[in-house]
């Protein structure tokens, strides 16, 4: 089957499961599971066995996905998808777990074909794409629809390839599958380079699989992993590495658009444009499917974006950015600490005085206590007053909500760097004011919201909101620039923009 490594020295080799399936060799390994080529002693046929054992690297998420794969394959009936043959519990010397038995397909993966030096013509790529879309169209017609979530060259098999035909296409490995019934999951699965931006946030739709199809075609056309190719505003640049027609390149770019709203809505829609090349998907590439508008960087913009699937860097002119936070001003803060120190001195002085013999009599102790109590109340009232004063919002540019104040100001005609990184299902934002007059100001927090509103009739603001609700980054610009930036950030981070009030 796919990516057979011929590992015959595995301790599982020659083990017989259920008195029926004899393991012959290892096909592959993933965290929490192993895949084997086995022989069905009853039917005398080769089969594939996926084994999930309760080992130290086992997680309950592995079991959930494993059971979902078994349930999904059991419900499928398509000649280009492996058949589910058996599912059972196992208890062997290596531990307890579950086994999933599938039909074996004697074919090589697209990844193996490329690694062996094979190159595909545009006609062959078109035929492969059509067959893949036919399989996906079948999956999406089911109730509930099934989303594969891991379309990549190693999961697509090609059988009986010849000079006259690209061969028969098969889609395997449903270990990451999701149905609409499980749409609330936040499980992040897939393969780096073939996953669309929204999938990093745990969100998957049929258009997410189409992104994987497009990236698979880019791999076949260039022989390079998509993650190794350069990107421009999240768009993978590959056309200079191929001799494909302009219409076919446009079609692949449509599938791999980083904006979920600007990809084909269905496999049927993608297939329609593929089979009718004279109907180039240019309109679909620029069609406004939501209220956020274009993803094309305006030529007049001075904001620059450099992105990979896990890191996005923004370079914003300092005149267009504000870092807003809440804080006490320096004078009030200094006064607060002064009064706290004074309160501590009063308490220590009182304790020292009442311990002396002269003040130890009840009469003297009463007056000393009364005096220090009055001083304590006076100081305490000042501390309470300072603590209850409303904090004001401050920006890195020295102006916020009508208040003037002194702070680190960004030099004019310079740029501020914002870095977004995907870590453990969260987006972490780092703001670096590298060119401030004083020492650099560094801010880092988890992104929780994106909103856009109109500042004036011609100026608009994009706001990044964080886990700490007293901090915010605001970028302003004209409508086209903010639309482009908002759409790109929202799609990359998997966070829907809110408060669009244009």
Image (spheres, rainbow, N blue to C red):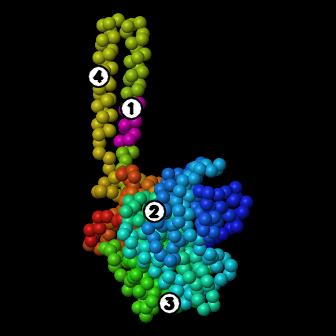
Indicate which label's residue lies in the foreground, 3 or 4: 3
Disc 2 to disc 1, how far (Cα)?
66 Å
Distance from the alpha carbon under mark 4 to that under mark 1 = 16 Å
Dot 2 and dot 3 residues touching (CB under 8 Å): no
**Label ID, residue 246:** 3
The earlier-in-sequence mark between 2 and 3 is 2
Q: CA distance from mark 1 to mark 3?
A: 72 Å
Residue at the image point whose x is 32% and y is 16% from the top = 369
Front disc: 2 or 3: 2
Which residue range is magenta in the image?
332-341
Query: Element under label 1?
Result: helix
- The location of residue 350, given as percent across then percent down, is 38, 18
| Label disc, if present, on residue 71 of the rendered structure | 2
Q: Is residue 441 shown left or right of residue 117?
A: left
Residue carrying label 1: 340
| Relative vertical location of residue 401 with respect to residue 207 in this rendering, above or below | above
Question: Vertical placement of 84 versus 331: above or below?
Answer: below
Task: Please identify the residue farthest to the right as the structure is shown.
Answer: 9
Q: Nearer the viewer, residue 2 or 288?
A: 2
The residue that mark 4 highlights is: 374
**Residue at image coords 65%, 49%:** 93
Q: Main secondary structure of the magenta part?
A: helix
Residue 192 shows in this picture: no
Instruction: Tell me the crowding category of disc 4: few under 14, some 14 to 19, or many 20 or more residues within 10 angstroms, Cα based.
Output: few
Q: Residue at x 35, y 42 (%)?
A: 332
Pointer 4 with pointer 1, Cβ within 8 A: no
x%, y% of residue 233? Answer: 48, 74
Mark 4–mark 2 distance (CA, rounded to whole Å): 76 Å
């Amino acid at each position: 089957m796919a990516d057979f490594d011929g590992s015959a020295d595995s301790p599982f080799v020659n083990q017989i499961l259920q008195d029926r399936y004899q393991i012959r060799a290892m096909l592959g390994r993933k965290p929490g599971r192993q895949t084997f080529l086995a022989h069905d002693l009853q039917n005398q046929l080769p089969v594939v066995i996926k084994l999930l054992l309760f080992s130290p690297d086992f997680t309950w998420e592995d079991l959930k996905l494993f059971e979902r794969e078994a349930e999904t394959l059991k419900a499928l009936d398509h000649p280009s998808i492996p058949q589910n043959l058996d599912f059972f519990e196992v208890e062997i010397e290596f531990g307890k777990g579950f086994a999933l038995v599938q039909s074996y397909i004697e074919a090589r993966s697209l990844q193996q074909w490329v690694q062996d030096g094979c190159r595909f013509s545009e006609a062959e790529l078109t035929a492969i794409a059509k067959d893949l879309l036919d399989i996906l169209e079948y999956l999406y017609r089911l109730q509930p629809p099934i989303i594969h979530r891991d379309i990549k060259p190693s999961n697509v098999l090609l059988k009986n390839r010849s000079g006259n035909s690209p061969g028969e296409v098969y889609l395997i490995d449903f270990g990451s599958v999701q149905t609409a019934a499980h749409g609330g999951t936040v499980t992040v699965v897939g393969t780096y380079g073939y996953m669309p931006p929204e999938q990093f946030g745990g969100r998957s739709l049929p258009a997410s699989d189409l992104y994987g199809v497009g990236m698979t075609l880019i791999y076949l056309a260039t022989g390079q992993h998509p993650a190794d190719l350069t990107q421009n505003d999240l768009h993978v640049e590959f056309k200079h590495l191929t001799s494909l027609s302009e219409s076919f390149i446009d079609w692949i770019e449509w599938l791999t658009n980083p904006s979920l709203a600007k990809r084909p809505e269905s496999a049927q829609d993608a297939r329609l444009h593929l089979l009718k090349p004279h109907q180039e998907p240019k309109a679909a590439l620029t069609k406004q499917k939501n209220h956020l508008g274009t993803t094309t960087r305006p030529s007049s913009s001075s904001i620059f974006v450099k992105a990979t699937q896990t890191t996005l860097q923004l370079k914003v002119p300092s005149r267009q950015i504000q870092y807003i936070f809440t804080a006490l001003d320096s004078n009030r803060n200094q006064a607060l600490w002064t009064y706290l120190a004074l309160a501590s001195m009063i308490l220590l002085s009182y304790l020292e005085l009442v311990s002396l013999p002269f003040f130890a009599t009840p009469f003297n102790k009463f007056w000393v206590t009364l005096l220090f109590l009055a001083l304590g109340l006076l100081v305490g009232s000042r501390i309470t007053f300072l603590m209850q004063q409303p904090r004001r919002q401050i920006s890195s540019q020295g102006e916020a909500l009508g208040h003037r104040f002194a702070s680190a100001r960004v030099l004019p005609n310079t740029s501020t760097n914002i870095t977004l990184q995907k870590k453990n299902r969260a987006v972490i934002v780092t703001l670096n004011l590298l060119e401030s007059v004083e020492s650099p100001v560094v801010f880092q927090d988890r992104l929780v919201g994106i909103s856009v509103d109109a500042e004036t009739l011609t100026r608009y603001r994009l706001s990044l909101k964080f886990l700490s609700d007293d901090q915010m980054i605001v970028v302003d610009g004209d409508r086209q620039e903010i639309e482009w930036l908002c759409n790109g950030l929202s799609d990359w981070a998997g966070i829907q923009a809110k408060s669009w009030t244009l």
